[in-house]
Image (cartoon, rainbow, N blue to C red):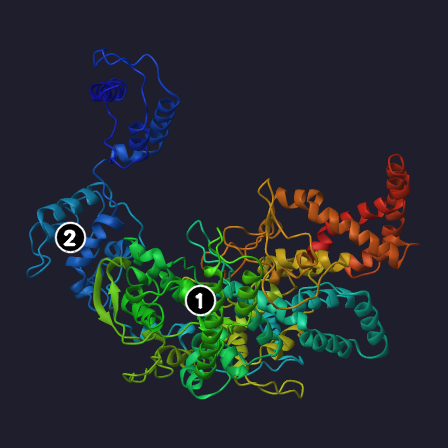
C-alpha cells in the first residue's frame, strides 16, 4: 500500500480518538501511547474516505487501544493539571541558575534558602516564600513578576516566568527534599568533613565489662543500655560447622568432628575451639574461601564481557591464584592493596626488567597483582580503530575501574559524580575525574591498547634478547627446510610428511614466556578532562590526578614529577600509599566491616559499599572504630599481639568472640523483649541463620559425596553448554574441582551457581543477594548434578558404614549425630524405598534406597544453611 494509504489509516485513527475521547490530553510524542499507535498497523482499504472507521484491526492495534486505556487511567491527574511542570526538572534548574548565588549553599540572603521546595516553603525573615496555587499570596512570584528579583543581569526570561507561574498554579507539585545537581567544583566545608565516615577513626576505650574479648565488651555495653544481653552459646558441633564453613567454605569431616569432641572432653571447650580456629586459618582451603569473597569485590571474570563475543581472558586466572595465595599467606592488607593498585611501580619493574637476568618471584607477584585493575569489562579489539563510537567502550572500562576501586576499597559510591556533583555526599564532579586521572596513565581512550595486546611477558630484557637470537637461528633452519620443499615437484604448497614434522619440531624449540595480564603505564604524558554530563564527546576543563577532597586532610597526596624518560607516572603508587595510611578514614573501616559481614550476615555498616550520607549508619560505631584502629595498629588481646594489617588475626578475634558463638535460634521467653526493641537484630542479641552461597553449596555437595577434586591453582575449568541451554561442568575429574576454579564466563554462568545467586559480573559485586525461588528446589531434586552426586554419596556411605548408612549420611551431611527419632524414621524410609526399588531393580534396590536418602539430605534446609 502506498503512502496515501498510510495517511488515511492515521487519519482514521485520529478520527476515532477525537470522536470518542474529545478531552484526551496532549501526550508527548515519546510517550508509551504514541509509540504503540505509531506501530499499530490498521488493515483498511486505501479507497475508503478518511472519516470511515476501519472495519478490521490487527493485534498490534488492539494492544495500542489497551495501552490507551492504561494511559488514560494513569494520567487523570495530568489531564486535570495539564500545564503543571515537574519541579525537579523544570523549576529547580531555573532557581539553580538564577537564584542560588544569593539563596544557596554559600549565602542565604534574608534567611531564604531556595535549594529545596521544603526550604522555599519554610521561607526566610519575611515568612514563607510560596503559597501553592496562590500567585498573589506568594512572595516568590511577586518578586519574580516585578523583576525585583533576581538582581542584576540574571532576570528571568518570559518563558522561565511562565514555567514558574504554571507550577505555582498547579499546586507546586514535587518532592520537598529534591535537590539540584551541584556544580562541578563545589566547595568542601568543615561541616562536610565532620561526617563520621570522613573522620579518621580514633581508638575508643574498651568498656569495663566482664568480657575477655573487646568485641564482646562493646556489644554487651550496647545491649545492656537496652536491658538486653547475648544469647547462650551454640552447642559445640553447631559451632564447629559454622566456623568451618565461614573460614574454609567446606563442611566438617568425620575426623575433624571426632578430634574436636575428644579435645572438648580432655580440655576446656574454649581451648579446643581456638585450636580448631587456628587449624582452619592455616588450611589452604581458607584462601579459596576468602579469595572468592575478594574476587566478587574485584569484579573478577575469565572473559571480557560487554559484546556478544565475550572473549576469554587467557591469563586472568593468575590474578585469581595470586589472591588465594595472598589470603593463605596472610599478606598484610596494606601490602595487598599496594601490589594490586601499583605493583609495577612498587617493585620498580621497568628498572628490574633491564638490570637483572631473571625476574625475582616478588616482582612477578606484584605484576600479577595489578590484574586487579584489569578486571573491568573490556571488549576492545584491534579492529576497534574502525568503529566510530569506540571511545564509548574505552571510557566505560575506565569508569568501571573507578567504581571497583571506590566501592570495594573505600566504601564510596562515586558514580553520580561522573555526570554532576554528588547530590548527597561532598564529592564534586571534578573530584571524580581527578580520581579517574590516576588510572588514565594506563587506560588511555585516546591511545588505547586493545585488551589482547595489553600484557607483559614474564621475562627480563636479557632473556628477551637471548630468546630473539635463539628463535632467529631456528627460523633460519625452518627457512632452509621450506626451501628444500619448494625445490621438489609437488602439488602441495605447504610442506607435508617429514618436512612438516621437522618444522613442527623446530617451532617447539622456540623460546616463549608466560604472559602476565598486568596493568602498567603507557609512555608520555596524558591529559584528563572533566566530561560534561559524563559524555566523552563533551570534554570540559583539564583536571590533575588527585583524591577526594573531603578525605584529603588525613595525609598528603603527592605525585612526583615525571621525568621525560620515565616508564611510569607514579600516580597509582601515590594513590595506594594514601589509601593504606593508618590515618585514612575509610580503608580499615571498610575492610573490617566486610569481614564482619561474612561472619554475621550483615555488616556493622549494613551498606558495605556506601559509607556516605545515604548509606546505613554503623550499628556499633565505637566497635567499628576500635576494630579499624586495631587492624592497622594491633593491641594485645589475651596476651596475643597480632601483626599489623593481619586479616587472619582480625578474623580470629571475631570468631572467638561470644557474640559470634551465640545461638541463632529465637527463644520466645528469653527474646520477646529483644525482638520488640530490636526486631532486625542489629544489636546482635543472637547470631543469624545464613544460607550458603552457590559456590559453597556446590563445594559442600562435592565434599560430602566424596567426589571433590582438591587440586589447587591453574587455568580455569571450561564450561559445557547443553542443547537445552544449561551450562554445566565437564564430566571429568576437573569438573569436580572447587567452584573458584571454574571459568567465570560473563555470558555463560554455570546454571547451578546462577540459581543460587552467583552474581553475573557486570562491574563488581559488593554484597550478594539471597533469593528463595521454586527453581532452586526443583534443581536440587531433579538436576543431573544432584542425582549424580547423591549416587556417589550413597556409594561412600555404604562403603564406610553399610550396617547403618542413615547415621553415617547424617553425620557427613549435617556435621552431627542422628537423633533417635531420625534413626527410626530413616530406617523405616530405607525399608520402604528398598521394597519399592526391588520391583524393578532388585540387585540395586538397597543402594538406590540409600541414594534416595542421600539426595533428600543434600536437598534439606539444614544442609543449605549455616546455623
From the top left corner, tell me how far across and down residue 371 is, in percent. Answer: 47, 70
> Would you name the residue on which mark 2 appears?
139
Q: Residues within 10 Å of mark 1 (few under 14, many from 20)?
A: many
The single residue placed furthest to the right in the displayed view is: 803
Among the two numbered marks 2 and 1 on one chain, the one whose residue lies closer to the N terminus: 2
Q: Is residue 667 visible?
A: no
- Residue 436 visible, this angle: yes
Residue at 63 percent across and 42 percent down: it is: 774
Point out the image quarter for the C terminus. Answer: bottom right
Task: Tell me if 7 is positioned left or right of 408 in this view.
Answer: left
Q: CA distance from mark 2 to mark 1?
A: 57 Å
**Could you tell me residue 36's position as x and y percent?**
33, 30
Asked whether, in this view, residue 798 is left or right of residue 448, the answer is right
The image quadrant that residue 386 belongs to is bottom left
Instruction: Give me the residue at 70% from left, 67% from top.
Output: 244
Crowd around label 2: few <14 · some 14–19 · many ≥20 (10 Å): some
Tell which of 644 and 203 is nearer to you: 644
Q: For the residues carrying marks 2 and 1, which lies nearer the camera in this image?
A: 1
Residue carrying label 1: 374
Question: Can you tell which quarter of the image residue 98 is in?
Answer: bottom left
- Expressed as whole percent of the image width and height from the top left, the position of residue 724 reads 59, 40
Residue at the image position 24 percent from the left and 14 percent from the top: 46
Horizontally, residue 404 falls left or right of residue 553, namely right
Dots 2, 1 in contact, CB < 8 A? no
Give whichever of 493, 832 is nearer the camera: 493
Amino acid at each position: 500500500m502506498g503512502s496515501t494509504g498510510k495517511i488515511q489509516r492515521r487519519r482514521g485513527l485520529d478520527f476515532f480518538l477525537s470522536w470518542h475521547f474529545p478531552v484526551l490530553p496532549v501526550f508527548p510524542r515519546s510517550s508509551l501511547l504514541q509509540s504503540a499507535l505509531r506501530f499499530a498497523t490498521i488493515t483498511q482499504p486505501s479507497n475508503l474516505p478518511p472519516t470511515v472507521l476501519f472495519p478490521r484491526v490487527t493485534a498490534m492495534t488492539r494492544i495500542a487501544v489497551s495501552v490507551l486505556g492504561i494511559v488514560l487511567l494513569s494520567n487523570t491527574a495530568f489531564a486535570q493539571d495539564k500545564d503543571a511542570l515537574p519541579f525537579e526538572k523544570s523549576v529547580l534548574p531555573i532557581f539553580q541558575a538564577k537564584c542560588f548565588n544569593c539563596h544557596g549553599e554559600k549565602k542565604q540572603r534574608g534567611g531564604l534558602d531556595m535549594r529545596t521546595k521544603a526550604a522555599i516553603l519554610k521561607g526566610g525573615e519575611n515568612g514563607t516564600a510560596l503559597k501553592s496555587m496562590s500567585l498573589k499570596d506568594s512572595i516568590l512570584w511577586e518578586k519574580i513578576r516585578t523583576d525585583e528579583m533576581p538582581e542584576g543581569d540574571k532576570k528571568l526570561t518570559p518563558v522561565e516566568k511562565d514555567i514558574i507561574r504554571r507550577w505555582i498554579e498547579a499546586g507546586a507539585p514535587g518532592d520537598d527534599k529534591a535537590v539540584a545537581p551541584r556544580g562541578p567544583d563545589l566547595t568542601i566545608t568543615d561541616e562536610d568533613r565532620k561526617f563520621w565516615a570522613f573522620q579518621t577513626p580514633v581508638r575508643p576505650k574498651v568498656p569495663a565489662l566482664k568480657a575477655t574479648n573487646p568485641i564482646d565488651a562493646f556489644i554487651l555495653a550496647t545491649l545492656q543500655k537496652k536491658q538486653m544481653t547475648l544469647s547462650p552459646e551454640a552447642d559445640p558441633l553447631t559451632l564447629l560447622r559454622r566456623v568451618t564453613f565461614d573460614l574454609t567454605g567446606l563442611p566438617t569431616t568425620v575426623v575433624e568432628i571426632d578430634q574436636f569432641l575428644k579435645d572438648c572432653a580432655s580440655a576446656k571447650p574454649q581451648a579446643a575451639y581456638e585450636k580448631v580456629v587456628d587449624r582452619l586459618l592455616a588450611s589452604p582451603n581458607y584462601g579459596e574461601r576468602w579469595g572468592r569473597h575478594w574476587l566478587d569485590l574485584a569484579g573478577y571474570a575469565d572473559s571480557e564481557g560487554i559484546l556478544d563475543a565475550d572473549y576469554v581472558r587467557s591469563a586472568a586466572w593468575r590474578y585469581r591464584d595470586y589472591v588465594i595465595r595472598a589470603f593463605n599467606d596472610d599478606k598484610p592488607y596494606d601490602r595487598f592493596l599496594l601490589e594490586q593498585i601499583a605493583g609495577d611501580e612498587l617493585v620498580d619493574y621497568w628498572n628490574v626488567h633491564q638490570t637483572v637476568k631473571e625476574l625475582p618471584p616478588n616482582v612477578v607477584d606484584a605484576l600479577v597483582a595489578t590484574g586487579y585493575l584489569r578486571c573491568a569489562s573490556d571488549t576492545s579489539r584491534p579492529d576497534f580503530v574502525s568503529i566510530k563510537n569506540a571511545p564509548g567502550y574505552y571510557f566505560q572500562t575506565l569508569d568501571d575501574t573507578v567504581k571497583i576501586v571506590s566501592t570495594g576499597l573505600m566504601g564510596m559510591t562515586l558514580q553520580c559524580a561522573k555526570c554532576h556533583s554528588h547530590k548527597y555526599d561532598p564529592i564534586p564532579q571534578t573530584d571524580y575525574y581527578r580520581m579517574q586521572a590516576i588510572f588514565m596513565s594506563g587506560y588511555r581512550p585516546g591511545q588505547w591498547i586493545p585488551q589482547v595486546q595489553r600484557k607483559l611477558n614474564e621475562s627480563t630484557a636479557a632473556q628477551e634478547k637471548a630468546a630473539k637470537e635463539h628463535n632467529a637461528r631456528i627460523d633460519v633452519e625452518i627457512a632452509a627446510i621450506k626451501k628444500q620443499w619448494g625445490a621438489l615437484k609437488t602439488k602441495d604448497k605447504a610442506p607435508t610428511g617429514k618436512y612438516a614434522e621437522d618444522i613442527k619440531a623446530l617451532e617447539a624449540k622456540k623460546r616463549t614466556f608466560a604472559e602476565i595480564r598486568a596493568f602498567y603505564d603507557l609512555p608520555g604524558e596524558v591529559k584528563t578532562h572533566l566530561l560534561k554530563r559524563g559524555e566523552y564527546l563533551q570534554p570540559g576543563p583539564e583536571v590533575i590526578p588527585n583524591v577526594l577532597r573531603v578525605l584529603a586532610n588525613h595525609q598528603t597526596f603527592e605525585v612526583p614529577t615525571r621525568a621525560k624518560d620515565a616508564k611510569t607516572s607514579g600516580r597509582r603508587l601515590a594513590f595506594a600509599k594514601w589509601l593504606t595510611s593508618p590515618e585514612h578514614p575509610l580503608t580499615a573501616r571498610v575492610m573490617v566491616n566486610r569481614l564482619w559481614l561474612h561472619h554475621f550476615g550483615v555488616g556493622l555498616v549494613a551498606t558495605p559499599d556506601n559509607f556516605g550520607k545515604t548509606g546505613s549508619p554503623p550499628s556499633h560505631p565505637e566497635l567499628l572504630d576500635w576494630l579499624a584502629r586495631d587492624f592497622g595498629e594491633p593491641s594485645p588481646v589475651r596476651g596475643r599481639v597480632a601483626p599489623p594489617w593481619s586479616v587472619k588475626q582480625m578474623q580470629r578475634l571475631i570468631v572467638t568472640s561470644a557474640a559470634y558463638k551465640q545461638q541463632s535460634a529465637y527463644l520466645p521467653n528469653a527474646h520477646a523483649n529483644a525482638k520488640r526493641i530490636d526486631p532486625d537484630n542489629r544489636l546482635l542479641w543472637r547470631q543469624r541463620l545464613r544460607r550458603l552461597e552457590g559456590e559453597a553449596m556446590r563445594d559442600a555437595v562435592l565434599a560430602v559425596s566424596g567426589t571433590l577434586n582438591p587440586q589447587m591453582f591453574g587455568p580455569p575449568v571450561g564450561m559445557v553448554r547443553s542443547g537445552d541451554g544449561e551450562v554445566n561442568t565437564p564430566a571429568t575429574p576437573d569438573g569436580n574441582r572447587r567452584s573458584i576454579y571454574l571459568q567465570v564466563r560473563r555470558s555463560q554462568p554455570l546454571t547451578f551457581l546462577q540459581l543460587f545467586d552467583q552474581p553475573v559480573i557486570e562491574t563488581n559485586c559488593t554484597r550478594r543477594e539471597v533469593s528463595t525461588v521454586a527453581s532452586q528446589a526443583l534443581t536440587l531434586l531433579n538436576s543431573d548434578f544432584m542425582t549424580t552426586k547423591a549416587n556417589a554419596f550413597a556409594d561412600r556411605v555404604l562403603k564406610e558404614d553399610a550396617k547403618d548408612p542413615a547415621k553415617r549420611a547424617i553425620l557427613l551431611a549435617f556435621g552431627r549425630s542422628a537423633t533417635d527419632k531420625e534413626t527410626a524414621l530413616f530406617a523405616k524410609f530405607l525399608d520402604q524405598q528398598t521394597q519399592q526399588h526391588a520391583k524393578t531393580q532388585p540387585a540395586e534396590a538397597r543402594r538406590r534406597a540409600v541414594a534416595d536418602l542421600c539426595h533428600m539430605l543434600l536437598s534439606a534446609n539444614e544442609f543449605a544453611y549455616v546455623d
